[in-house]
Amino acid sequence: MDAQLKRGLLDICVLAAIKDEDSYGYKIIKDLKPYAELSESTLYTILKRLEAAEMLTVRTAEHDGRLRKYYHITPGGIARIEEFREEWEEVMKIYRFVIKEEADL
């Protein structure tokens, strides 16, 4: 898969994982596991990129005597998910065209 495409899809997956409730790194990886394999280093790179783009915010809270970073989606992150949904319709049109072409072979 094209690296840029995969990067964009993983960004959307991370945003979707925190869309309904704040979450932390390990839980995000666990929630995404059925859909995408994600290492800790890749996740934290994505989280930093999304924070820099103001699509999420970070807060630190104590949990079981340790500090844990919780990630919260911003209106910009919600807007990005909506943009993705609109873009995906176009991608699916292209996919259906490609599949149709292969079926004709």
Image: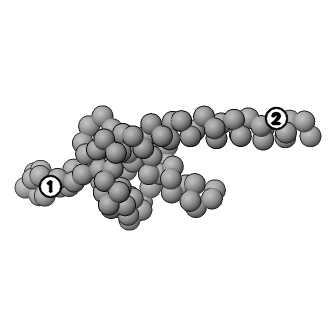
**Where is the C terminus found, in terms of image quarters?**
top right
> How far is mark 2 from mark 1, CA to CA?
50 Å
Dot 1 crowding, Cα within 10 Å, few <14, some 14–19, many 20+: few
Q: Which mark is residue 100?
A: 2
- The extreme left residue here reads 65
Q: Quadrant of residue 104?
A: top right
Q: Is residue 72 left or right of residue 46?
A: left
Query: Residue at horizontal 64%, vertical 41%?
Result: 91
Q: Is residue 50 left or right of residue 69?
A: right
Dot 2 crowding, Cα within 10 Å, few <14, some 14–19, many 20+: few
Q: Does residue 32 appear anywhere in the picture?
A: no
Residue 12 position within the rendered picture, expressed as x and y whole percent measured from the top left: 45, 46
Which residue is tagged 1?
Answer: 60
For the residue marked with disc 2, what is the amino acid? Lys
**Label 2 secondary element:** helix
**Where is the N terminus found, in terms of image quarters?**
bottom right
Relative vertical location of residue 18 with respect to residue 54 in this rendering, above or below:
above
Query: Residue at horizontal 50%, vertical 53%?
Result: 8
Q: Is residue 6 left or right of residue 66?
A: right
Residue 11 position within the rendered picture, expressed as x and y whole percent measured from the top left: 44, 51
